Image: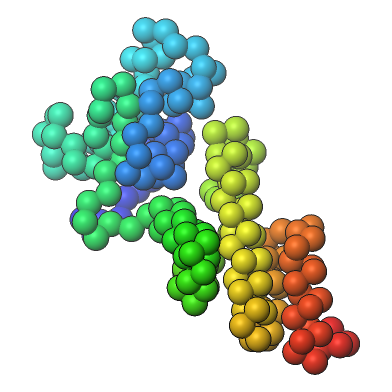
């Protein structure tokens, strides 16, 4: 609603639960997954009560004007919770993953310019490691690595497409982008060498 929140008023665990729901914005997250992530995986009446209290605090914090049970942002679906994306809402993670899927599909169908555009959009949405403020927390580590890998793959794919289209300078840029994300990606080094050679950048 165009309103800045004072996040310091929210308990750290509640903030973390909200970040997990945000990473999966629009998707249902089962309560067992939340219990594993934030309550050591022990499902007891006490932990389920704590989860319900945490979700209730998030609803009150995000929508203080809404009556109890009237949250529009955090919906419950059976034993799962979902951060609702209304029309016009944007999730950079969701947009990134959608662009990656579009790029792969278009490339498989040999619609290379469309694929290149989709991979470029994906890379524009990838702003670096997912939630670095959460450190090595187990609940975010797998998603962080998966998104990093998909960003690197998208950059390599874009580089290969541009090189095949005889646009070596753009291929160099895409390959270098990949290596900024993952400096050990052999495919990126190989396409970078070929692209530099094709662009007359022998010294590089």
Residue found at the very far left of the displayed protein: 67
Q: Position of residue 130 (x, y in %)?
A: 55, 50
Residue found at the very far front of the displayed protein: 109
Q: In this view, does 68 lie to the left or right of 171?
A: left
Q: In this view, does 130 lie to the left or right of 95?
A: right
| Image quarter of the C terminus | bottom right
Q: Is residue 144 above or below residue 160?
A: above
Q: Where is residue 203 in the image (x, y as percent from the top left)?
A: 88, 87
The answer to whether residue 127 of the structure is visible from this angle is no
> Which residue occupies 15% across, 29% down?
69
Residue found at the very far bottom of the displayed protein: 200
> Which residue occupies 45% across, 31% down?
13
Q: In terms of image quadrants, where is residue 27?
A: top left
Q: Position of residue 137 (x, y in %)?
A: 60, 35
> Which residue occupies 79% across, 60% down?
186
> Which residue occupies 31% across, 21% down?
79
Front in this rendered view, residue 137 or 90: 90
Front in this rendered view, residue 160 or 127: 160
Q: In this view, does 138 lie above or below 187?
A: above
Front in this rendered view, residue 53 or 87: 87
């Amino acid at each position: 609603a165009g309103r800045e929140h004072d996040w310091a008023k929210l308990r750290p665990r509640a903030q973390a639960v909200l970040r997990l729901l945000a990473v999966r914005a629009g998707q249902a997250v089962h309560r067992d997954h939340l219990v594993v992530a934030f309550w050591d995986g022990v499902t007891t009446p006490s932990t389920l009560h704590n989860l319900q209290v945490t979700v209730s605090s998030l609803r009150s914090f995000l929508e203080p004007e809404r009556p109890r049970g009237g949250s529009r942002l955090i919906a419950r679906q059976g034993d799962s919770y979902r951060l609702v994306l209304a029309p016009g809402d944007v999730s950079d993670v969701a947009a990134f993953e959608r662009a990656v899927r579009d790029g792969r599909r278009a490339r498989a169908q040999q619609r290379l310019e469309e694929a290149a555009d989709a991979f470029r959009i994906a890379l524009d949405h990838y702003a670096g490691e997912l939630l670095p403020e959460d450190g090595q927390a187990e609940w975010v580590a797998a998603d962080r690595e998966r998104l990093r890998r998909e960003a690197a793959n998208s950059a390599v794919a874009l580089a290969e497409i541009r090189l095949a289209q005889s646009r070596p300078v753009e291929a160099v840029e895409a390959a270098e982008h990949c290596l900024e994300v993952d400096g050990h990606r052999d495919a990126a080094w190989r396409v970078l060498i070929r692209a530099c050679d094709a662009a007359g950048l022998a010294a590089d």
